[in-house]
Structure formats: C-alpha cells, structure tokens
Amino acid sequence: MEFPEVIPADSDCVDDCCLSETIMKFVPKRPLSRKFFRKLDKACKVDPCCWSKDSLGYRYYIYPELPIDRSNGTHKRQVEVDGKMVDDWDGNFIEVRIPYIGDTIYVKDGWIR
C-alpha cells in the first residue's frame, strides 16, 4: 500500500509491564484523496488478515516475524500450541490507523505480552 507524503506532527510513548509502544502521529502534506480511500477499501478486501475497517477508520495490524517479508507470509508470527500452529500475540507489533476524516495517520510500533 503506497501512502501519500506525510509530515510528522506528534509522538507519545506508553510503557508498563505488559505493553510498550511508541505512537507517532502524521498529517498528510495534502488532503487524502478519494482514490487513496478506495485503495484502503480494496486492501481490506484483498488482505483482510492485516487490513480492516471499524468505527474509527482503517486499520493495518501485524505481529511480524523479523525480518518482515510479506511475500512469504511473515506478517503474523505463529507458535505451536497443543500440536497446532496459532497466532503468537506475545512480542512486537505494528499498527497503522487512518481515521475516516483523513486528517491524520497514526503509526504504533510496540511490544505486548
């Protein structure tokens, strides 16, 4: 997914025993176009494992293996539990949020336990 040019606007950090994340806020250099939102809608249909829409807007969320190689499916870590491979929710995550208003783009880089 290609994003428009953005300008860093703000950042925040959360750190407690089970969650550590850096939240970066960006503003688009130019208003986000309808074409961009159509691409987000398409991404939600084509890649629903990572892209979704909810009441807040569009969301991209992954628990990556490192290094990230989406072409080989390494966007969701998995571990074996009782002989089955399940998503591993313990570790690094990346989240991107684009509200419907389109005036900001939030990026979170964190770790959760």
Image (cartoon, rainbow, N blue to C red):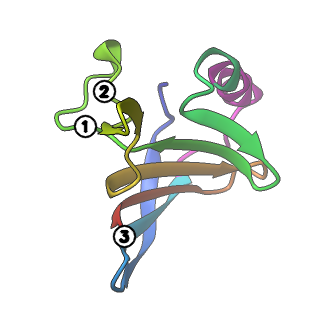
Ranked by sequence position, the earlier of labels 3 and 1 is 3
- Identity of the residue furthest to the front in this view: 82
Residue type (three-letter) at the residue carrying disc 1: Glu
Residue 56 locus on image (x, y percent): 76, 56
Please identify the dominant SS of the magenta region. helix
12 displayed left or right of 47: left
Q: Check disc 3: other Cα within 10 Å, few if <14, some if 14-19, many if 20+.
A: some
Residue 100, label in figure: none
Task: Label 3: state its secondary structure.
Answer: strand
**Tag nearer the camera, 3 or 1:** 1
Query: Dot 1 corresponds to which residue?
Result: 65
Rounded to the nearest angstrom, the CA distance separating label 3 from label 1 is 17 Å
Query: Dot 2 corresponds to which residue?
Result: 74
> Please, is residue 92 above or below residue 31 in the view?
below
Image quarter for residue 113? bottom left
Rounded to the nearest angstrom, the CA distance separating label 3 from label 2 is 21 Å
**Tag nearer the camera, 3 or 2:** 2
In terms of depth relative to the viewer, which is nearer, 88 or 39?
88
**Mark 1 vs 2: CB contact within 8 A:** yes
Residue 21, label in figure: 3
Residue 24 locus on image (x, y percent): 42, 64
Q: Which residues, given as a range, are shown in magenta? A: 28-43
Q: In percent of the image, x 35 and y 31: which residue is there?
A: 83
Task: Label 1: state its secondary structure.
Answer: loop
In terms of depth relative to the viewer, which is nearer, 80 or 88?
80
Rounded to the nearest angstrom, the CA distance separating label 1 from label 2 is 5 Å
Residue type (three-letter) at the residue carrying disc 2: Thr
